[in-house]
Image: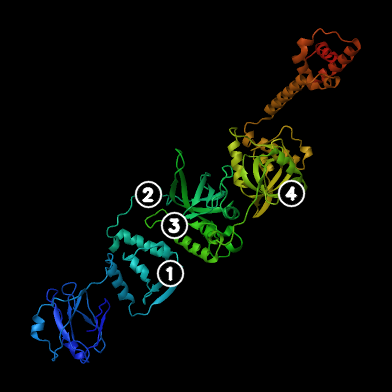
Amino acid sequence: MPPVSVTSDPIELNVAPVEISTLPALPSAASPVRRMISPESPDDAVPVAIVIAPVKPASPAFTVESVMPPLLVAVPWPLWIDTLPPVASDEVPAAALAAEPPTKKRKVEPPDEPKPEPFAREAKHFTEVRLLNRDVLIVPEGTDKYNNLFCTIRAPDGGDVAELLTQNGLVKVVDWSLAMMTAGAATLRAAEKAAKLARRCMWRSYVAPPPNPNSLIGKNFLGTVVEVASGDSIVIADSDTGAERRVTMSSIRAPKMGNERRGIKPEPWAHEAKEFLRTRCVGKRVKVSMEYQRKIPTQGDGPEIVLDMGTVLLPTDQLKGEDKDNGVTELNVAEMLVLRGLASVVRHRNDDEDRSLRYDDLMQAEQRAIKGKKGVQNKDKPAPVHHVNDISQNANKSKQFLPFLQRAGTSHAIVDYVLSGHRLKLSVPKEGALISFAIAGVRCPQRDEPGAAEALRFVRHRCAQRDCEIDVEGVDKTGTFLGTMTYSSPSGGRQTQTSLGLELLRHGLATLHGSYDPNRHANGAELVTAQDAAKHKRLGVWVDWSPEKEAAEKAAAEAAASSASCRSSPFTLKSFCCVSCLSSIMSNFGPELAGASVDSKLSTFLKSTLSLHAIEAGASLTAAAVVMPAVAMVQG
């Protein structure tokens, strides 16, 4: 007898059609029916009897898909195939039907198959009734690593089958395939959220999470970008309150800048990401949609670092070039970074609700960056190398570098950091140097002095991380370069160069040094005029200014300076010709020099000279009271 193979696929039997009509249906699983099927060529074939036992009660014994040979019969498991002796008649004897199955039988079990997940059959039926044997519209979206094609399928009525399945709670939305979609990802997200809330099908046991204490949704604001901290973090000044808020962009990660003081080098493409944000965002108005907070533990017992995550939208009317000509009114700054390969998208868990509201757009932008091999997505292209010579804290290097800046004249620089109202750290790209710079002749309040915070804020909002031009005049003993600085500011619809020192004096946020000589500087007279105007308007540090008070303070300062000069140097004839020294001479040296004997001729000369100056100065001193101590000092 030839071997009989049994599989789970439909069994192909070459039988006559007449036998099909006589096959009875199974009444139940407890009473299997044995039926003899005679082959068409009984010469060399052995008749077989097939006993079919259904898996479930009331299920069909078999399904006939064709009545013409060859016959395909799909039967459920288990299936017994028994061999019987040949019979002459087509009819099976009654004894054979009533007999028990032979003792020698072979039971073939199918391989263990996983049970279907809940609502798997319902999802399949839902799809079949809408798509099977119908014309559909297919939109190819992409392929996975196994070259499986993923498409968006639209039914004849135009509905998206994936969206319909999601609305009825028969599927889950997964991020890895959602990233392939060119459009409609947000719609699927919204449909899944609605199905969860309605507890449809597979979401029947869904329990909404408690309110997220870290959620910042709804706390939106408008502001101006003041500073770029890193490739994915910026500082924004709120337009309503004026407070500065640091915002980290949701669901993306840019290369870290590192820390030179701790010996941590910047990651590849970190400088490019930060520079991209600086040129695109600093000084621009933005819309911020706050979304959630992320807590980062620190080493040791230090407090956690709390990051405010949000989406920053930049209106395109402030941009130029390709960013402006894309046909949209505002751009997602995070998406701009990802699209250029300057940041990567963070992979969230499916149940993680703390993510960007435009997460699907970010995933699509990353796929485009991967295809274009941009930035961090190109493993074959090394990142540019940056070398910076930091001489901001080295006085010797600063003095050696001074001739280069003086010969260059007006140099282009970038404000790297604002140290105080008049001191800044600048980057000079042409020289590849990082220097410390101060406005010559101008001094702002320092640290806890009144007006220090206002001056620092003024300079940060106008100059921080912006392009500027400097003219270096010299360097002080600490290695800080001194000179003038101008920055670009809007005026009458266009950008004009404005002197930082002049603006500080004009707003009363700084004063001129007492030793500053306006005649030695090209803009000296202009600086003096700006300071005088702020005085009369009583702005900033001049809020309590008055002419009388200024005259008294000036006289006191001159007297103090004269006193210090007289104590530190011996008297000469030349020093007596200074009227301002007369009162200090008497107050400091009178008691010690009284009664000294001097030459009569020298005494007569000094008496006439000093008496004249005393009268001109309006001093209430007699000639003898002045001459005697002065002459004694000269003689000594």
Picture quarter with the C terminus? top right
Foreground: 467 or 67? Answer: 67
**Which residue is at 16% across, 72% downward?**
57
Left or right side of 505 for 23: left
Give the labeled residue for mark 2: 212
Indicate the position of residue 405 as horizontal and vertical percent values.
74, 46
Q: In the rendered structure, are the residues bearing label 2 and label 3 in contact, judged by CB atoms less than 8 Å apart?
A: no
Q: How far apart are marks 4 and 2 (CA)?
A: 54 Å
Which disc is residue 515 wearing? none
Q: Distance between the residues labelled 3 and 1?
A: 21 Å
Picture quarter with the N terminus? bottom left
Left or right side of 576 for 325: left
Q: Distance between the residues labelled 4 and 1?
A: 60 Å
N-terminal of the pair, mark 3 or mark 1, is: 1
Q: In the rendered structure, are the residues bearing label 4 and label 2 in contact, judged by CB atoms less than 8 Å apart?
A: no
Indicate the position of residue 365 as horizontal and vertical percent values.
50, 63
Q: Which amino acid does label 3 sit on?
A: Arg
Q: Which amino acid does label 4 sit on?
A: Thr
Q: Which colour scheme is used?
A: rainbow
Foreground: 293 or 70? Answer: 70
Q: In what element is the residue under mark 4?
A: strand
Q: Distance between the residues labelled 2 and 3?
A: 20 Å
- Disc 2 or disc 3, which is closer to the eye? 3
N-terminal of the pair, mark 2 or mark 3, is: 2
**How busy is the neighbourhood of tag 2: few (under 14 within 10 Å), some, or many (20 plus)?**
few
Left or right side of 72 for 481: right
